[in-house]
Image: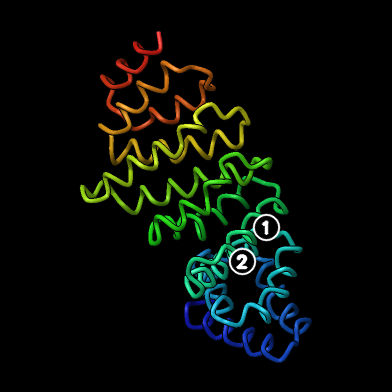
């Protein structure tokens, strides 16, 4: 399958869903999800679906989620991303993303979904996305908490150290402060990923912030190791000294 074929398939699925032909749409997409397929192609299919009416598309997306395939999470994530930007400020896509990650109940499901919706939203609609992500920091489910860190990773990667984004980087570090003492392994991996990428592109901000965090204590060593990943050796020594 190439990009053009993926777009054609997405359009075919959209026409079927407009007619309420969910079983036919499922039969058309299922063989694609049953094989290894490049994520960008699956994303194109999902984006086509996301541009349709949520009332018609979402029941089908529920079917896709129920299949619990890796490719299905890509299709779903990109469909929800498009829905979010078609209906700005709405929390519905975020709520569906959270529910899908909980259903997936595996790290790659949370990461695929987290990169596509909350990550993209944070990069392009910062304040609104930050508000929608705020309750996820203390969510009872570890996958929702993990996605907060995944979203921050996407933001930092796209900001790529731009000076005009430094104030947002500072906001995100403050936003993650309550999560630095996260204890669940899977959630720590996600939050640490976000901190690691901020440290890569905004090392001075990350260094000052980390030195404060280590004095507070209560964190898992894995969290600190990930946050220190891209920082220079001398910075690592400073932070470790503050910890000692």
Residue corresponding to mark 2: 76
Near-viewer residue (44 or 244)? 244
Callouts 1 and 2 close, C-beta under 8 Å? yes
**Residue in the picture at 39% in, 42% down:** 172
Is the residue 36 above or below the residue 222 in the image? below
Label number found at residue 100: 1
* Residue 7 image offset from top left, x and y in percent: 52, 82
Sequence-earlier tag: 1 or 2: 2
**Residue in the picture at 65% in, 40% down:** 142
Is the residue 227 above or below the residue 27 in the image? above
Characterize the local packing of mark 2: few (<14), some (14-19) or many (20 or more) Cα atoms within 10 angstroms: many
* Residue 19 image offset from top left, x and y in percent: 71, 91
Is the residue 188 above or below the residue 169 in the image? above
Residue, far right = 23
| Quadrant housing residue 237 | top left
Near-viewer residue (38 or 184)? 184
Q: Secondary structure at mark 1?
A: helix
Tell me the distance, in whole angstroms, between the alpha carbons under discs 1 and 2.
Answer: 9 Å
Residue 213 appears left or right of 238:
right
């Amino acid at each position: 399958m190439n990009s053009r074929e993926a777009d054609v398939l997405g359009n075919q699925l959209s026409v079927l869903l407009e007619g309420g032909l969910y079983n036919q749409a499922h039969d058309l997409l299922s063989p694609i999800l049953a094989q290894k397929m490049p994520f960008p192609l699956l994303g194109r299919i999902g984006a086509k679906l996301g541009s349709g009416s949520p009332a018609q598309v979402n029941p089908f997306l529920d079917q896709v989620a129920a299949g619990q395939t890796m490719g299905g999470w890509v299709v779903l994530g990109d469909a929800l991303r498009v829905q979010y930007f078609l209906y700005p400020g709405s929390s519905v896509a975020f709520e569906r993303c959270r529910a899908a990650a909980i259903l997936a109940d595996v790290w790659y499901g949370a990461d695929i979904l987290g990169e596509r919706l909350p990550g993209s939203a944070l990069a392009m609609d910062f304040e609104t996305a930050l508000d929608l992500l705020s309750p996820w920091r203390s969510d009872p489910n570890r996958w929702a908490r993990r996605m907060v860190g995944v979203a921050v990773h996407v933001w930092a990667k796209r900001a790529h150290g731009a000076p005009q984004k430094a104030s947002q980087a500072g906001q995100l570090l403050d936003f993650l402060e309550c999560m630095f003492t996260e204890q669940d392994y899977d959630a720590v991996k996600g939050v640490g990923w976000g901190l690691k990428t901020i440290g890569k592109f905004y090392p001075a901000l990350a260094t000052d912030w980390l030195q404060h965090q280590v004095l507070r204590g209560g964190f898992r060593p894995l969290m600190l190791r990930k946050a220190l990943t891209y920082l220079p050796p001398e910075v690592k020594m400073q932070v470790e000294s503050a910890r000692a």
